[in-house]
Image (cartoon, rainbow, N blue to C red):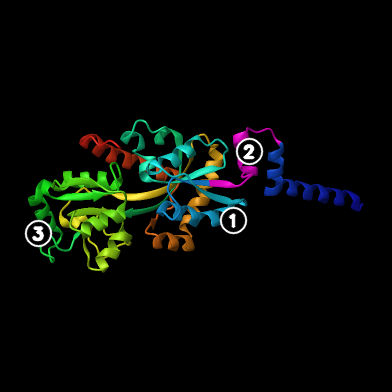
Amino acid sequence: MSRPVFRRASLLMIALAAASPWALAQNNAARPATAAAAAPLNWPTKPVKIIVGFPAGSSPDLTARTFSEPLSKVLGQPVIVENKVGAGGNIGADAVAKARDDHTIGLMINGNMTIAKMLNPAVPYDPLKDLAPLSLIGTSPLVLTAPVSQPGLPATADAREFFVAARNGGDKWSYGTPGVGTVGHIGTELLKSRSNINPVHVPYPGYPQVATAMLGGQLQMALLPPALAQAQVRSGKLRAIGVTSAGRSPLVPDVPSLAEAGIRGFNLEIWNAFAAPATMPKPIQAKLAAAISEIARSQDVRSKLFQQGWQVAGTSPEGLANRIKADTSLLGGVIAMRGIKAE
């Protein structure tokens, strides 16, 4: 009499087991599926590479290495950072765009993902077509800085007085940047149009050389990254006029925004982000994007990025795509208006 009961119970246990997530996954795996749809179930199958278009020790390189270890733990494979340096990061970005191994992504600055092709039509990749956004990692304003002592401007002058002096200085004033087509260059040209000033552009190899030129009196102003600006301001060698974000930034909380100085409609930030080749299967992109954004928002990584000079974003691919669209429109408009071309 007990045999039918046992049999019914056994069938019930089999049915419940078959309905478990593990059994369903095994069952689904046995069904025919496209390569793209099945890819996340066994991906990654080898080490994942993060390409950085800047040298070891640079800000993008430090950000990529901050992610390599936690991302490796999530994916279960080594994550290797490879530096492909040159052309303002565009050599690395092109390598990412052309990667076809489905295990290569890139950590890039905003210029590589927005205006690269506008500045130089010869750039071999199209950021809007060949790259897939994964996550916006960190943002940072630039800080408008100036020498503490310069003719016609008292050391106690505030931001509004600075802009009055800059207007009076006309093209006798000059500003420095790390080169033609950089955010510092395009951003200052945007600032010129919004504030009715007209300093002359002088390109330098990098931000440290720009700061040195200001200290030597060769430049009257420049947009600098917060960490570099703050170091010079604290030492009493430079003055901070304002930050380029819409409001005050937690990275430099004591520095007013340029909006407070009466410069309306001005919002400019540098940022970095992860991107994949557009050819990478969508499920793999989604898996990477979810892992990267979660890592970015973790307390440990958030703290490290803040120390590197970034306010953490950790967005979805859609959030990064929206930022790319907005910045391409803003910076592209300045490029067209001023006729800026990369050298």
Q: Which residue lies at the image location 28% right of the left edge and 41% below the top edge?
A: 331
Q: Nearer the viewer, mark 3 or mark 2?
A: 3
First reached walking from the N terminus: tag 3 or tag 1: 1
Q: Nearer the viewer, residue 160 or 89?
A: 89
x and y, in percent, of residue 259 in the image: 20, 54
Q: Label 2 sits on what residue type?
A: Ala
Q: Residue 44 magenta-drawn?
A: yes
First reached walking from the N terminus: tag 1 or tag 2: 2
Q: Residue furthest right?
A: 1
| Mark 1 lies on residue | 73
The answer, for residue 295, to whether it is visible in the render is no
| Mark 3 lies on residue | 151
Discs 3, 2 touching: Cβ within 8 Å: no
> What kind of element bears circle 2?
helix
Q: Label 3 sits on what residue type?
A: Pro
Q: Residue 266 magenta-drawn?
A: no
First reached walking from the N terminus: tag 3 or tag 2: 2
Q: Which residue lies at the image location 27% right of the left edge and 64% below the top edge?
A: 232
Q: From mark 1 to mark 2, how far is it between C-alphas? A: 22 Å
Residue numbers of the magenta segment: 31-49
Q: From mark 3 to mark 1, how far is it between C-alphas? A: 57 Å
**Residue 150 found in image quarter:** bottom left
> What kind of element bears circle 1?
helix
x and y, in percent, of residue 307 in the image: 40, 63
| Mark 2 lies on residue | 38
